[in-house]
Image (cartoon, rainbow, N blue to C red):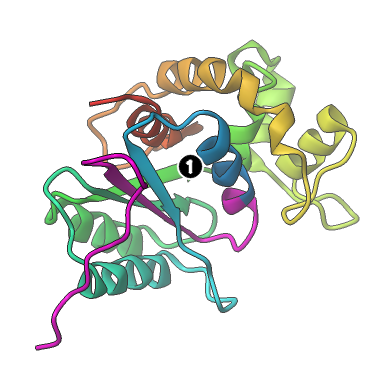
Amino acid sequence: MRKRKDFVRLEGVRSARLVVIASEGRCTEAIYFAEVKNRLCAPNVHIEILNRDSNESSPESVHKQITDFMREYNIEDDDELWLVIDRDRWHEAMLSRIAQLCYQNTHLHFCMSNPCFELWLLLHLEDVTEYDDDTFTQLIKNKKSKSGVPWLKQRMRNLLGSYSESNYEACHLIPFAPLAMKRARALDANPQDRWPQSIGTRVYLLMDSITTKR
């Protein structure tokens, strides 16, 4: 068996805790967490954002990417590896299987947004519990417009002036991250469930880990 390598952690930090993030999207999550790494990360936390080299974006491919990382590097007791997943169109049986694999390993964390990661971004700017019934229904359905743009992406464009999955100014959102965490926690009516069954995002748990010195 090939010997695992030690991961090179933060210089000058004797016992930096490693937080590894693998996500479905190639750009959206990476843009956000790169900004978090620069501006909000606790001093003893090393964030490693895994790049996607292909267009495969299923939860299964995310799980494979992060388990490949675990096979390559030595993982210490307090290290955490997070799978950032969208509920979207995926079958519940497949999601359940991946969630179960995560729960069987104390280092792995299953972090889903329902319907997608843009909900987490939106919570920096709006409290969705204050929406009227019609707007909240549009959020739940997240249907594409005639031009093919899902409702959440269009909402972000309206609020930020411009937004695309591969190009947006995460720096404008970061000051409101604590507010987004508070709103996401309030939305999580059943935190014991493996993922939010209705509108919600567990990214606040990942942010807790990143921003808290332990």
Q: Residue at x 66, y 33 (%)?
A: 139
Quadrant housing residue 176: top right
Q: Is residue 28 magenta?
A: yes
Above or below 205: residue 99: below
- Foreground residue, 98 or 136? 98
Q: Position of residue 12 (x, y in %)?
A: 33, 41
- Foreground residue, 65 or 211? 211
On screen, residue 40 versus residue 91, left or right, reads right
Question: In the image, what residue type sits under mark 1?
Answer: Ser
Q: Position of residue 156 (x, y in %)?
A: 77, 35
Quadrant housing residue 101: bottom left
Q: Which residues are magenta?
A: 1-30
Quadrant housing residue 102: bottom left
Q: Position of residue 42 (x, y in %)?
A: 39, 29
Query: Which residue does the numbered mark 1 point to in the structure image?
Result: 113
Q: Residue at x 81, y 41 (%)?
A: 154
Q: Is residue 116 visible?
A: no
